[in-house]
Image: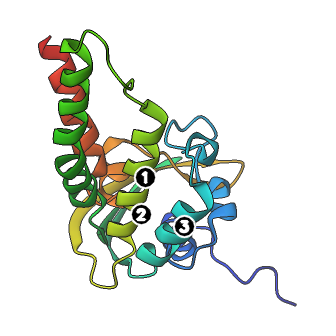
């Protein structure tokens, strides 16, 4: 008799998670993550959530990874993994660089015009930003970025779960975390 078809080890969890990301099985991802992980993205925060989801699925179909080394210490483990992900950080930086000058000029015009004809439309700007980002990540030749990370794992109820951290999230998001952190650094300077 066959007790189980899959091994219960840290590498299998990481590989299954990354395979689901690559294959667009996003509804399964939470089963691989420790319950209190902060890296869940709420699709309802986006105006163009269906278009964004389809663009992300297309971009992540190019995901490549390789598990390199695993260290297990009781109920904790690390799986050193090389992840080659769509460069979402570059796509976001490019989107911001493209749209920010126009938004800045609109805001200046509004601030110095005694009778502004129109107010800055934050919702329209957000939609334009999403449209531009979606176009950039939908390209067939989207650039990829490679990071090697130690994926932290925790064993709970005889199941290995990913205990995601900034390093893992950054690698998986193609340096998008670094772009967001640069904005946080800018805010801290004020």
Determine which residue is flagged by label 2: 134
Q: Is residue 25 left or right of residue 3?
A: left
Any part of residue 65 in sight: yes
* Residue at horizontal 43 percent and vertical 31 percent from the top: 121
Q: Position of residue 157 (x, y in %)?
A: 72, 48
Determine which residue is flagged by label 3: 17
Q: Position of residue 1 (x, y in %)?
A: 87, 90
* Residue at horizontal 57 percent and vertical 40 percent from the top: 45
Q: Nearer the viewer, residue 119 or 41?
A: 119
Q: Are marks 2 and 3 in contact (CB under 8 Å)?
A: no
In the picture, the disc for residue 130 is 1
In the picture, the disc for residue 160 is none
For marks 1 and 3 on the same chain, the one whose residue lies earlier in the sequence: 3
| Position of the C terminus by quadrant | top left
Q: Report the mark closest to the observer, 1 or 3.
A: 1
Q: Which secondary structure, mark 2?
A: helix
Task: Tell me if residue 152 comes above or below residue 36 in the rendering.
Answer: below
For marks 2 and 3 on the same chain, the one whose residue lies earlier in the sequence: 3
């Amino acid at each position: 008799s066959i007790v189980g078809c899959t091994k219960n080890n840290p590498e299998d969890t990481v590989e299954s998670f990354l395979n689901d990301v690559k294959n667009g099985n996003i509804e399964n991802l939470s089963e691989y993550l420790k319950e209190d992980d902060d890296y869940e993205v709420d699709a309802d925060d986006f105006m163009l959530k269906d278009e964004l989801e389809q663009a992300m699925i297309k971009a992540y179909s190019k995901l490549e990874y390789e598990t390199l080394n695993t260290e297990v210490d009781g109920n904790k483990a690390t799986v050193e993994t090389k992840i080659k992900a769509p460069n979402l950080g570059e796509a976001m930086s490019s989107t911001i660089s493209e749209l920010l000058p126009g938004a800045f000029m609109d805001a200046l015009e509004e601030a110095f015009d005694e009778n502004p004809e129109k107010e800055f439309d934050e919702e329209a700007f957000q939609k334009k930003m999403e449209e531009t980002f979606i176009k950039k990540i939908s390209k067939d030749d989207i650039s990829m970025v490679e990071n090697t990370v130690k994926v932290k794992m925790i064993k709970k109820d005889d199941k290995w779960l990913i205990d995601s951290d900034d390093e893992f999230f950054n690698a998986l998001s193609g340096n998008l975390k670094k772009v967001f952190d640069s904005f946080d650094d800018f805010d801290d300077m004020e």
